[in-house]
Image: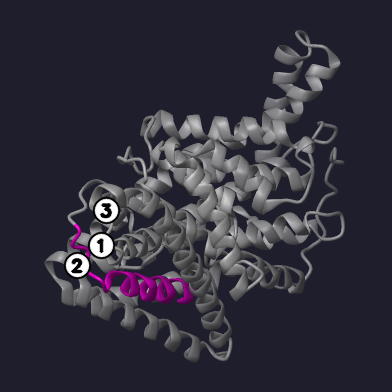
Amino acid sequence: MADLPTRYERVLSWLDHYLIRPLYTDRVRRLILQSFPFWVASILTGLVAVGYEKMFGWAEQLSFTWLSGTPWLAFILTPAAFGVSWLLVRELAPAARGSGIPQVMAGIELSNPAHHQRTSYLLSLRVAVVKVLSSVVLLLGGGVIGREGPTIQVSAAIFRTINRLQPAGWPQLSRQIALVTGGAAGLAAAFNTPLGGIVFVVEELTQMHMARFRMAVFTAVIIAGLTAQTFLGPYLYLGYPKVVAASGRVELVVFLVAVVCGIAGAAFAKTLLWLGNYRKRFTSLAAQAGWVLGCGLLMATVAYAFGTEGVGTGKPIINRLLFQNNGLTPWYLFPVRFVGMALSYSSGGAGGVFATSLSAGAILGDGVGRLMHVGVPDRNLLILVSMVSFLTGVVRSPFTAAILVLEMTDRHSAIFQLLISGLLAQSVASLLDRHSLYEHLKQGFMREALAENAQPTAAPEPAHVE
């Protein structure tokens, strides 16, 4: 691996000498040379996202199999999986824990001349590998996690690595733009939602003017998304649910659902933050291991008592509610999933909250619809609105949440209800906390990265074009 940069430089030099320089003007050549590494990173992101999705699907199905056949195994496998997932992170890459989006946000903020070396703590290939392994192990043992946030961190790590491999004198985009573009490509590949990736960048990842990086982001999300579609097909994340035109009464229930789910999402974020702060009391290895074991045993109890409904990503639950809703979803499923999400995230392993927040919101929205005596045909709109609202309550990105759900379901007829519910959820969630879960966690990861011992002096990096 030591000569990898040299080989990479030779390939780039050959492409420039034989295929680019003879055919294009200097201005076009410069644009191509700037963009080419991002195209490579986008293809790699798409391939990794496909492999990660396959691994995640396999792990979730295997967890359903052993839990359905031998539920008492939960008291052995779940604590063991929680422990292994935590140990992988603790011993190999502490920044691989949790979702991944706060790490990307912190990395973007640290991508300046004074601190850019510290981003390796958050976004190295080592962190990416540990992220994938830890999250798959946690899901295999019955964790309630998603892969979408982790995919974003993995993608940003790929873009950062490719950007650092450029030879001296090669025209480059800035380190910050590389991470922003990587985050967008990761979300687009994870959900098959290219517009969601673009909106996510504008709303969540950066305060820079869009003109500085729009072409990089647009091409990255297209290439990463097309690469994923090449292997997975032109799928929708949630299919084509039927959404009927809402009556005046149902529209009022839409607003109620947005308020309830927005508050619930904010309460979930506050719960995760409280658990994270409480866990800091346990400083010794034995105490930390005891915390993880306790989370695993509590999660095992949930899995044993409620079966496959209480574990996994929750995507099968969303599909059942949207396409096979018999109106009999048990009332206790939302608190069960809420507890499972909190235990899994707080255990210290890797795993995201995007997909699980969508499923929690869907369950809660369906429940509110039942309480308000909304018929099953009208309830799909409430379920879509509730997914947007709960996710907004957690991450405070209403437009990203609305566009994601829109692209996942292709239900353009509901776009105004989705946008309005996202904004309403944002407003009520701000009453509980002005900042999102990711903003709180970002500050902690920045402090960790800055507190790390200085790395050995690295070879000077080439200048970056801002």
Q: Is residue 441 magenta?
A: no
| Residue 376 left/right relative to 16 | left
Q: Earlier in the sequence, mark 3 or mark 1?
A: 1
Q: Residue at x 72, y 68 (%)?
A: 446
Helix, strand or loop at label 2? It is helix
Q: Is residue 131 left or right of residue 124?
A: left
Residue placed furthest toward the left: 69
- Point out the image quarter for the C terminus: top right
Task: Please report the residue visible at 52 percent of the width from the left and 67 percent of the height from the top.
Answer: 98
Q: Position of residue 92 (x, y in %)?
A: 55, 67
Quickly name the residue at label 3: 321
Vertical order, 85 against 322 (above or below) = below
Could you tell me how far apart the alpha carbons at marks 3 and 2 are, in whole angstroms? Answer: 22 Å
Q: Which residue is mark 2?
A: 67
In which quarter of the view is residue 177 placed? top right
Q: Nearer the viewer, mark 3 or mark 1?
A: 3
- Asked which secondary structure carries label 3, the reply is helix
Q: Is residue 264 left or right of residue 31?
A: left
Find the magenta span and give its range. Answer: 327-348
| Residue type at tag 3 | Leu
